[in-house]
Amino acid sequence: MGAPSGVVSYLTEELVRQGHQVTLFASGDSKTRAILRASCSRALRLDPQCKDPLPYHFISLYRLAQAADAFDIIHFHTDYLHFALFAHLWGKTLTTLHGRLDLPDLRPMLHEFAMMPLVSISNAQREPVPWANWYGTVHHGLPSNLYYGGRGDGGYLAFIGRICPEKRPDWAIEIARRAGMPLTVAAKVDKADLAYHENRIKPLLEDPRIDFIGEIGDGEKGAFLGDAAALLFPIDWPEPFGLTLIEAMANGTPVIAFRRGSVPEIVEPGVTGLIVDSVDEAVAALPLARALDRAAIRRRFEECFSVERMAQDYLRLYDAVLRGGTAGAVMNASFDAPSARC
Amino acid sequence: MGAPSGVVSYLTEELVRQGHQVTLFASGDSKTRAILRASCSRALRLDPQCKDPLPYHFISLYRLAQAADAFDIIHFHTDYLHFALFAHLWGKTLTTLHGRLDLPDLRPMLHEFAMMPLVSISNAQREPVPWANWYGTVHHGLPSNLYYGGRGDGGYLAFIGRICPEKRPDWAIEIARRAGMPLTVAAKVDKADLAYHENRIKPLLEDPRIDFIGEIGDGEKGAFLGDAAALLFPIDWPEPFGLTLIEAMANGTPVIAFRRGSVPEIVEPGVTGLIVDSVDEAVAALPLARALDRAAIRRRFEECFSVERMAQDYLRLYDAVLRGGTAGAVMNASFDAPSARC
């Protein structure tokens, strides 16, 4: 819940590859080399029958609680759903919070369950709740063989993700227009954003240089990002991570990203892309971005955002939890964000 | 969660009045003579700041779990939220399920937590899951001094509740029109039902004999129902209880209700109202309903739907849980629905 299922899967498989014994609590159709414990047969977000995912989460968490003795460490990606049930076992748990943390209803929860060891997916993500029980920041990572450095010779700019006000596809379109370049928009439209899409975005898609291709599958992402001259990431919200940024890097594709949320932690200006504060700056930055060395971008991805690095970071934090002993000792300890070394 | 806060409050105060020691876990603005343990200051459904009620429920449940030893019996009105956390304490819990039970995602939950003793608010409510761990049915009850027998001389029919397709305000309007009587519609319009209201109901409200007065407060209900010639209850869904039905009875007001869900358990044809299967039948039943003895309706309310009867039913079920001993023994025991005696 709240986790991009890809990231949890990459971490799981990497830990298994390194020889760790891993049990994955997920839907029955999960492809994994870990031991799989399923509370439902199909991925919840793909099951049209499933109106309420909560029951399946509760069943998984309950079964896990029954079996907790069998595990050295339990790594949760279930938002706060498990807090009450695992509070007494906090010393063998680690929780990665994947969502935005500026929602007021989350604060009392983080106060009440102040014993739960937490991981942020960027330092920026912590901003609304810096006092929470943070053990570290672990930036996401991707398997090195998921993508390869593309050639970037498709002659278009890329926008990928979701049509919604937070992602500002309208700004991406404006940037491309003013730069005189074609833009391909690979994005889904959720029900909640239908009106926004109809009223604000669709009229902009009439421009023949703007190509709206809808949602693309994981298998098409590599070619789409690898062929793009650059990725436009003109977000208008404090994005906690921005997986697309490192997917672009893995394809050797430079990004032009707005200075919000995690962007300054992920994009290295002049190396993997450029960070801007406005549409004007984005247009001006485009030639610089296109001139960046794609092989160097791919190298930075391998150095900083590989699944091996992510697994290493988490293993260090698992150790930190297990060494912790008592809540007080752990909560006063200061851990560097392992990813900060990149 | 899922419970009409009124019913839980009536039960709580009645138990206190009878001399039981009760601790109520609810919002800080709850008016109660029980000991109050609050996880938030204001009622969640009234707090515009509160977007997600789950954290507050989890905090309450966690605090309750910490203090569970202090209680003989814990009575939950929190849907299934507490199941995982209290499964090991099932033998001192009772859970009233207040919602509809035909949602497919609920079934695996009731299987997984088959040890939890459950109460239905009508026998009809159980229909989708008759195999669940039912200890009894307890119909809702109201304090006798909440309403008094009204005179029914307002010269109008009443519809009360929510504008939504399940409650069929359009049928209520059609019945009133064909009966040649004014109808007063006291109903809120939730955001989710705005389109339905605009497109389907608003045009019908142009009829001068139809008076739409919006949502009314608890203080206005007595006069509204007590002055009405009859309550129209033309529901088009398996309503698990239908509190309005007994509110009308408490005011001595006859009801004309459609044969769905709990209606046949609550309405006694020829005594407290009439049960019908169509708009035609409702129109035909109206003179019969209006001829019913309002004092007799009020008496039936006092006999069958008082808060004393509800508390008595629950006290019997608390005993049944505590006598239960083991899950097997309890699950095989058969308890009559106490309310069935009415």
Image (cartoon, coloured by chain):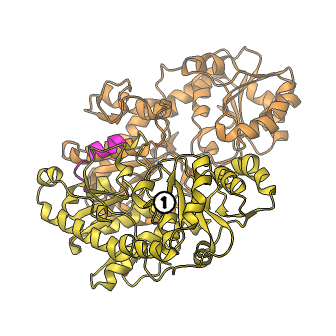
Chain colours: A orange, B yellow
* Chain holding disc 1: B
A197 horizontally vs A217: left or right: right
Residue B240 horizontal/vertical position (percent): 43, 54
Q: Compare residues A137 and B45 and report the one nearer the observer.
A: B45
Residue bearing the label numbered 1: B242
Q: Is residue A176 above or below residue B331?
A: above
Q: Would you say residue A104 is visible in this rendering?
A: no
Indicate the quadrant containing the N terminus of chain B: top left, top right, bottom left or bottom right: bottom left
Q: Residue at x 71, y 62 (%)?
A: B181
In the image, residue B108 lies in the stretch drawn in magenta: yes
Q: Compare residues B202 and B32 and report the one nearer the observer.
A: B202
B45 horizontally vs B118: left or right: right
**Secondary structure beneath label 1:** loop
Which residue type does callout 1 highlight?
A: Gly
Residue A284 horizontal/vertical position (percent): 84, 35
Residue B69 horizontal/vertical position (percent): 21, 71
| Neighbours of disc 1 within 10 Å: few (<14), some (14-19), many (20+) | many
Q: Residue at x 72, y 51 (%)?
A: B201
A236 horizontally vs A9: left or right: right
Q: Which residues are magenta?
A: B107-117
Q: Residue at x 57, y 25 (%)?
A: A250
Q: Would you say residue A25 is visible in this rendering?
A: yes
B47 horizontally vs B62: left or right: right
Q: Is residue B190 above or below residue A234?
A: below
Q: Residue at x 46, y 43 (%)?
A: A52
Residue A74 horizontal/vertical position (percent): 30, 45
The quarter of the displayed image where residue A262 is located: top right
